[in-house]
Amino acid sequence: MLELKSCPKVYRKDQDKAVTPEETVSRVKALLDEKCNGVLKCTRKVDTGRLGIPVFISECGDEAREVMPTRKQMGKGASVAQAEASALMELVERFSFFSFWSKSENFTLATYSEAEELWPGKVISIEKILQSVGEDMDTGKARVILDLVRWHFHPALNVHTGEEEYVPLDWFKILNEFNGSSAGNTSEESVLQGASELVERHVCAVIDRERPEVPVIDPASCEDDVLSNLCKCFDDNGIKYIINDFSFGMPLPTVAVTAWDPSTFPGMSEIVFTAGTSASPCKAAIRAFTEVAQLAGDFETGRVYEASGLPKFTELEQTGWLGAGECVKMKSLPSVEADDIYDELKQFAAQLEEKGYTLYTVDTTHPELGVPANYNFVPGFQFRERTPHASLGLFVGRILAEKVALDIAGDGLDVISDIYGGP
């Protein structure tokens, strides 16, 4: 069972880490070379240097390509070492995740009722599964639907209680894909990283859907040295930007940045709209600004980025709602900042529980590589690419239609139709 423990911060400049980025790069490259040769082809710096904000990619080797759908990963940071470390950890995260799912021995195939018999009192509640799609349904009917499919059960750590629960992990993979996967120098660092991504995707999905008035953060309140230097990199190159508070009542602060270059847009650059989440407001803003640099191609290369957590704007007029809110200072955002990453994680999980959400994590560390990796999920959190009409019946029906023998699938679909009152 995964056990989380004290994890003092050693590096705190542009991100909070358990070791310096230089150590991360050296150690992870050595482990990849020794334990998993062929996973990493190379890392290389790909920014033009215009903004002075480094961007790296890690290219997959042949071994990684056998299990991963992606061929390269991007990394960001306010320093060269952190950007390279980020690109390496993106590779580790995804290689570990897809390797974990490729091993059938990692799972116990069972219906929900069979799982309850196998692990009495230790199976994630049906209420949590319904919460994951925002559905209000009688639990007896939900159990009938869940029992139409044999799920891939695996133990997950409830971060707040410290207890292990058995979960139908493929259910959450269907909902979230590989969002929430993470890697770090320690398990605590990895889990907080993954949890931060989940919060970021959740608040961005809700805000994008509802378009509420959001606070505008005063750039003059960005007093952290690294953050103020990032703002200066943008200012010195004529890059315009809006900084918003997207925290939306969550325990972790989320900062959104919308940036564009009037001198190159729309011919050689795009409007970049992205966000960052971390334990403290400044670190969240640093993540957002470096993410802009990663996506923008220095606002001069004609690079077209792929929208994910937030939509892509094609006209400046589409950004108007982002500048309409009250002006606030960076320090007004929520924070769980502490000297120990585990303390931050505990505080976050406790405050999340108070809001009715539970953070779960699964250890996906590659057994040979040994670099901590996790798959994290929070039932009830939103994800922009997921249909807003999600339901238990919709996703179980899809599984039956796509993966089950036709005669059995037909009977199961009839059951779902009867429960939902279909024709």
Image (tube, helix red, strand yellow):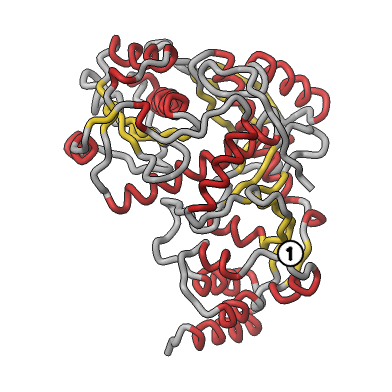
Q: Secondary structure at mark 1?
A: loop
Q: Tell me which amino acid carries mark 1.
A: Lys
| Above/below status of 104 relative to 112 | above
Residue 278 percent across, percent down from the top left: 49, 32
Does the image show residue 48?
Answer: no
| Above/below status of 304 relative to 145 | above
Residue 73 percent across, percent down from the top left: 56, 31
Q: Nearer the viewer, residue 45 or 145?
A: 145
Picture quadrant where residue 319 is located: top left
Q: Quadrant for the C terminus, please.
A: bottom left
10 Å crowding of disc 1: few (<14), some (14-19), many (20+): some
Q: Which residue is mark 1?
A: 122
Residue 41 percent across, percent down from the top left: 68, 25
Q: Nearer the viewer, residue 418 or 344?
A: 344
- Residue at (53, 80) in percent of width and height: 138
| Above/below status of 375 relative to 227 | below
